[in-house]
């Protein structure tokens, strides 16, 4: 496991760049992670998605279904993909400080 | 090593289980290797790490082979030093083996097809994975996913209500998009022609492939359904080497389709899922499958050929290339169908080299995407694939496997290629021409107005004004085809050898030439190449024909434009006419 400078701190990330300790996450970390996923400017909408993902994860210890994400945030599927070009699983979840999703993704 | 005689429980267990796994295929692969080195350069890990011999397939195989030699083969008892027999003693030894079988091989089988002795490394690499899994030694990602598949019934732990809710959502989205309240995703409808199964990632993260498939089924007028349970056609048993898991997962799906009395199980574009369900599943599950199984690639191609859906391929005009998934292509022999479909729905298809059985791994195979610990190795080995992709000049790489989608996406990002990845279902849905709404009885299939239907109904013979050369050394075959073509208005010239085919093509300038691939004399591949290189025949369409599908490869290996189509033998009149008209009438 290596560490990477994110949001002004050294943070442990896995080989795919997902942070290991959700407690180490903050907005500055999220902004730096976003850049690695092709999102250079975190808009209000981006934060809405990211905060939903993070809160869901803290509550249930897993990533939500895309269905839940869209329903709860009110965004269309296409809008999510436009916001996070690498998709909800790898892009948005990484920015929200979730561990790498399991399985064929 | 022989002085050590204390073994850990796990090591002992692995060795004794090895004996039970020695099928004829595996034993053959254990003894047949002559260390000739033919496999070495077939492996993408080797090509990306030329200085590291531990990636060589024969070296990797020997990590497992030494155990067989030492414990199960008489040569290892008589002269162990000569046959390099060896053993495992501690859990550290097993960890080392884990690093090789999970971390240095994606089970892509490229070395297997390049082995002159028929050694199938991937098969016994998988077996070795299974031995380690049986004592709990495996990468964490594999353990998590396997657990979800065992316990929740799908590899991403998707709950039934969430799955059903997502299907409803996709139905609503489609109704809104098409402004048509009739379009829907039926669930658990009995006695359907098609039961459609998917990869959990589609429902969990990207259901656009589900709505695209639903749209295609709807416009094809298909009587289809999705099952409420047992819908996961992926199978981590293939990756972990655990045949029990493989059997349990496949059985769930088979039992559900049987319960619904589905006539055909269609498997969405997923390489390992297709192989696990259609090719390996019945054996793992010991299940006598009472229905047909088909890849959605074949389904979509069938709809187009039968005129059930219509497409406007100019909507997919970016240059595309195709990446063969190892499981679909090398392991299950699906080479031509995706290409045929791609040519029908895109305008600028470029072959990637090498391709088909010789294509290189996406680097995400064998479950590698779930094993983060090996990501740096995976990305380093991906330089081979990156170079292959770059050389095509394509902007889009199409693949029929979700693992490949992710492996390719990762390497495209890592090597900063200007490309994106997509699947056939997305391209077909994008090109789909939505027929003008006609009044149909509620629940009935929509009528599909189209040129094909009109042409059949018209007086004019469908092959009027066409000139066709039929080349085959069997006179009966020539007569059969020629008669059918002539009955439908074509002028036909007959050729009984490759040289006669060349002569007829040059003198008659036909629209189409059907070329048998097994004629004596000049090899068909050479005839084909000469036809293609003939400046006077640039417009000639060629349809290859054989009862031995493996011969097609000799044609596709030529560095010239591939044939416009192929026909299997035997062929019935309707499908012959359909294929020939498709070649003649659709611009390629």
Image (cartoon, coloured by chain):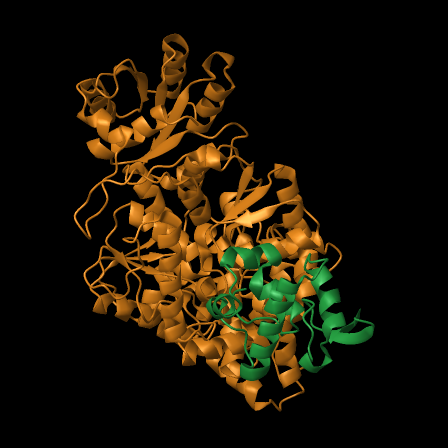
Quarter assignment of residue B274: bottom left
Viewer-nearest residue: A70 or B484: A70
Vertical placement of residue B354 versus B507, above or below: below
The colour one sees for chain A in the rendered image is green
Residue A19 visible in the picture:
yes
Give how far across and how far down residue A104 sits, in percent.
Answer: 52, 65
- Is residue B546 shown above or below B273? above
**Residue B85 on image: x %, y %:** 60, 73
Q: Would residue B480 be found to the left or right of residue B538 on screen? A: left
Tally the numbered discs: 0
Residue that extends furthest to the right in the rendered view of this protein: A8
Q: Position of residue B30 (x, y in %)?
A: 51, 65
Which residue lies at the image location 52% right of the left edge and 33% below the top edge? B348
For the colour orange, the matching chain is B
Q: Quadrant of the C terminus of chain A?
A: bottom right
| Residue B347 screen position, x and y as percent | 49, 32
Q: Quadrant of the N terminus of chain A?
A: bottom right
Q: Which of these two is toward me, A18 or B115?
A: A18
Q: Is residue A73 above or below residue B332?
A: below
- Residue at the image point whose x is 66% and y is 44% from the top: B418
In this view, the residue in front, B477 or A95, is A95
Query: Which residue shows up at 25% across the image and 15% down it?
Result: B464
Q: Quadrant of residue B186?
A: bottom left
Q: Which residue: 21% across, 33% down? A: B574
Q: Is residue B534 above or below residue B379?
A: above
């Amino acid at each position: 496991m290596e560490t990477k400078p994110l949001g002004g701190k050294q943070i442990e990330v896995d080989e795919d760049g997902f942070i290991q300790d959700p407690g180490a996450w903050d907005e500055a970390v999220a902004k730096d992670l976003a850049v690695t996923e092709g999102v250079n400017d975190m808009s209000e909408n981006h934060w809405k998605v990211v905060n939903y993902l993070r809160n869901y994860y803290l509550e249930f210890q897993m990533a939500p279904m895309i269905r839940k994400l869209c329903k709860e945030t009110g965004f269309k599927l296409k809008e999510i993909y436009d916001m996070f070009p690498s998709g909800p699983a790898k892009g948005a979840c990484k920015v929200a400080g979730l561990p790498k999703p399991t399985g064929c993704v | 090593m022989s002085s050590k005689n204390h073994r850990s429980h796990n090591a002992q267990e692995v060795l004794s289980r090895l004996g039970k796994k020695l099928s004829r295929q595996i034993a053959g692969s254990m003894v047949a290797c002559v260390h000739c080195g033919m496999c070495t350069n077939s492996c993408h890990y080797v090509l990306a790490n030329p200085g590291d011999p531990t990636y060589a397939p024969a070296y990797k195989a020997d990590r497992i082979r030494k155990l067989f030699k030492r414990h199960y083969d008489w040569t290892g008892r008589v002269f162990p030093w000569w046959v390099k027999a060896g053993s495992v003693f501690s859990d550290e030894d097993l960890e080392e083996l884990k690093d090789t079988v999970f971390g240095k091989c994606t089970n892509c089988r490229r070395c297997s097809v390049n082995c002159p002795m028929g050694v199938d490394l991937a098969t016994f690499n998988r077996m070795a994975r299974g031995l380690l899994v049986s004592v709990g030694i495996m990468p964490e990602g594999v353990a998590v996913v396997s657990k979800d598949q065992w316990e929740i019934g799908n590899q991403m732990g998707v709950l039934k209500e969430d799955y059903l809710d997502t299907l409803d959502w996709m139905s609503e989205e489609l109704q809104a998009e098409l402004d048509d309240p009739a379009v829907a995703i039926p669930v658990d409808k009995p006695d359907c022609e098609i039961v459609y199964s998917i990869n959990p990632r589609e429902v969990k993260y990207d259901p656009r492939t589900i709505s695209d498939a639903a749209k295609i089924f709807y416009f094809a007028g298909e009587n289809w359904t999705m099952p409420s349970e047992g819908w996961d056609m992926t199978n981590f048993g293939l990756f972990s080497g655990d045949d029990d898991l493989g059997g349990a997962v496949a059985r769930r799906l088979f039992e559900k389709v049987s319960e619904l009395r589905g006539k055909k199980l269609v498997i969405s574009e997923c390489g390992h899922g297709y192989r696990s369900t259609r090719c390996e599943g019945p054996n793992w599950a010991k299940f006598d499958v009472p229905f047909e199984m088909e890849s959605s690639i074949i389904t979509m191609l069938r709809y187009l050929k039968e005129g059930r859906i219509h497409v406007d391929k100019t909507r997919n005009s970016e240059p595309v290339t195709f990446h063969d998934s190892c499981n679909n292509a090398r392991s299950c022999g699906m080479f031509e169908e995706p290409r045929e479909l791609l040519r029908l729905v895109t305008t600028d298809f470029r072959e990637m080299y090498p391709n088909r059985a010789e294509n290189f791994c996406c680097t995400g195979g064998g479950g590698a995407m779930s094993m983060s610990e090996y990501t740096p190795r995976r990305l380093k080995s991906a330089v081979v694939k990156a170079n292959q992709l770059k050389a095509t000049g394509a902007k889009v790489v199409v693949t029929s496997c979700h693992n490949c989608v992710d492996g390719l996406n990762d390497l495209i990002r890592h090597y900063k290629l200007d490309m994106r990845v997509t699947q056939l279902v997305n391209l077909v849905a994008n090109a789909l021409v939505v027929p003008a709404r006609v009044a149909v009885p509620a629940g009935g299939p929509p009528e599909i107005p189209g040129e094909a239907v009109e042409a059949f109904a018209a007086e004019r013979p469908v092959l009027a004004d066409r000139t066709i050369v039929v080349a085959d050394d069997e006179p009966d075959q020539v007569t059969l085809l020629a008669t059918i073509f002539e009955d439908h208005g074509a002028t036909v010239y007959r050729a009984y050898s490759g040289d006669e085919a060349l002569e007829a093509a040059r003198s008659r300038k036909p629209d189409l030439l059907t070329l048998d691939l097994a004629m004596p004399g000049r090899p068909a591949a050479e005839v084909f190449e000469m036809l293609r290189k003939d400046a006077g025949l640039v417009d000639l369409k060629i349809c290859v024909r054989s009862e031995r599908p493996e011969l097609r490869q000799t044609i596709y290996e030529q560095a010239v434009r591939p044939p416009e189509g192929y026909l299997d033998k035997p062929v019935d009149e309707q499908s012959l006419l359909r294929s020939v008209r498709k070649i003649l009438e659709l611009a390629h």
